[in-house]
Amino acid sequence: MKRTFLALIKPFNFYLLSAITCLLMSFTSSASESNASLVVTPKNCVALHKGQKCYLEVTFDWQAKLNNYCLVNNTRSQIMKCWSDKSSGQYSFDFQSTQSNDFSLQLQDSNTDVAHAQIVVAWVYKSKKRSKSSWRLF
């Protein structure tokens, strides 16, 4: 008795389809449990030369389920501000850094991240030094 390729692959397709369905359902349920958002504006900070500090006034806006939260600078391991029994908040400060910084909104009791944001540091000029191959006439 000859089995065709389709007859052999049919059970595999069923298991693959089942696995994909379960995976999508788990993503959907975890997304609905935690609908927290953390938005930083502006998102980019530009310095003139690489290695120089960039200076920027940034504002964080967040929304989540009613709870106790803290805004944390993960790059510096620094708590920026905490809120008690809030479902939204706003925080502004003067950002100064030579590198990109990651921030998160955390549950105050468990330090669990519920939302993330990043301030990206960029430069106009990569290096102050002139290239050694530049030509000069005088």
Image (spheres, rainbow, N blue to C red):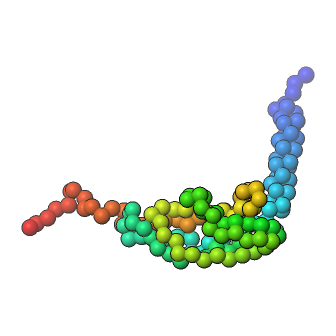
> From this viewpoint, which residue is outermost toward the right?
1
In this orientation, does residue 78 appear? yes
Q: Based on the displayed image, in which of its 4 quarters is residue 27 positioned?
A: bottom right
Q: Quadrant of the C terminus?
A: bottom left
Q: Is residue 36 above or below residue 16?
A: below
Image coordinates for residue 49, horizontal then vertical, percent? 36, 67
Give coordinates of residue 122: x percent, y percent: 46, 66
Identify the residue shown where x is 45% and y is 70%: 54
User: Residue lying furthest left in this view?
Assistant: 138
The quadrant the N terminus occupies is top right
Residue 2 pos. (x, y %): 87, 24
Q: How many marks?
A: 0
Compared across the picture, whether 133 is left or right of 53 comes to: left
Q: Tell whether 132 sits left or right of 32.
A: left
Residue 32: x %, y % from top left: 83, 62
Q: Residue furthest top?
A: 1
The residue at the point 84 percent across, 52 percent down is 26
Residue shown at the point (52%, 71%) measured from the top left: 95
